[in-house]
Amino acid sequence: MKMNKIILGIFSAGLLMTGCGPQIEKKEELPAPVPASFTISNLVDASDASNKNSYLFTNTTPGGYVSNWDFGGVAKSRQDVDTVFFAYAGSYEIKLQTASKGGITTTTQTLVVPANSPYAADFTITKLADDYHYKVDVTTPNPKKVGWVLPTGDTTSTASASFYWPWKGDAKITLTTTASNNGVSSITKTQSIPSDDPANPYLNNSVFNKLTGGINAVNGRTWLLNPAPFQTNVGPDSDTSTSYYHFPDGLGGDAWTQGALNNEYTFVLRNYQYIPKNTNVTASGLYAKKYFGTATALYQDIQYADPHHKPATFIPNKDASNVGTGYGFTVTNGSYIGYFEDRYKYYIVHISDDTLFLAHRYDDQPTAPEPGSNARYFTFYRKK
């Protein structure tokens, strides 16, 4: 009798194991992807019949639940329905990518815009005293906003602007406007400069020739941040004071070795080019959260890949306080030299053919890392 119970128990356990085992389910067959589709409607400005450059785009994909638009390079959007302003005549390839239960599909249509909008960004270029000085004037009627990027890298929001560009070649000027109809557009024009300006005050300047290698150094001169002890300082705004915090251990750790030390800083005299090797930078704890979204201790540096750290024009200038060499430069377009502190102006305190000593002044922006520290200093050595 006992044996029969054991056999019955084994048989029951087998049934339970069979019933609890993995079940093979029939795979759900997904439907075929729904072809993406959309419509385009021309929107004529009711207050100005001449303005026919706005278009309404509507995703008409049945059951589509994602819209990913590329409006011919003019704009991008993820809205199901959107309005886009095309300032200039031309053919634009409109692409819509959409998703449905069956998968992702893409479709394109060609939009032909027959004429420029009367509200398109535009401007004139006027030569002033010589081949190197020019004035630019907005011709877009009554723009709400104006933004210039001049060949020097300077930016301004005035209706007129002027610039000096001493280099042979094409000087590029970009204007972006928000028109009275809220249409945003940009245009870039070039002004041909027939020759280098022999009167350029920086052409034969010894400081900038050492920084860049001079006009004949077509690839410029490259500098590396010195990680050794006592080469990075924080202290008073003076090139002679010894009241510094000297970083006695030098620059080390991932924040530096993967950031500012893992970079190269090249300066080219022609066209005033600043060229960093990559976007890896170092930022102090004070700025880590504010600008990079990373919370860290006040005096703890971090490494960060910042897309703003990229090739840009630098603007040479004289330093009115005459500390050190009396010269410095500003890096444009939001780029900077390796260590980020929300300041873009640098002062050349000392320079030789092999060593560069730069200062950052805290009064060039409103936030100082500690009271009484007027400047931060870095030492670079020349890459051979």
Image (tube, grey):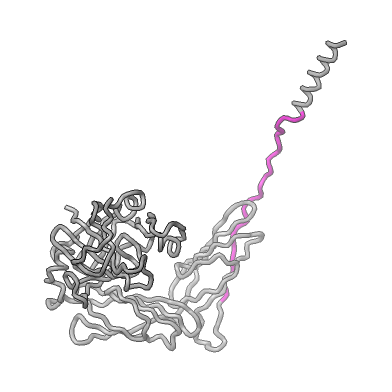
First to last magenta residue range: 19-41
Residue 174 location, x and y as percent?
Answer: 34, 76
The one nearer the camera, 376 or 215, is 376
Q: Quadrant of residue 130?
A: bottom left
Can residue 250 be seen in this snapshot?
yes
The one nearer the camera, 149 or 45, is 149
Magenta span contains residue 29: yes
Residue 253 location, x and y as percent?
Answer: 34, 49
Residue 247 location, x and y as percent?
Answer: 28, 55
Magenta span contains residue 302: no
Considering only vertical position in the picture, is 46 above or below 379? below
Q: Main secondary structure of the magenta part?
A: loop
Residue 60 location, x and y as percent?
Answer: 63, 65
Residue located 18% across and 75% down the image: 322
Along the horizontal axis of the image, is 230 left or right of 174?
Answer: left
Q: How many marks?
A: 0
Can residue 331 be seen in this snapshot?
no
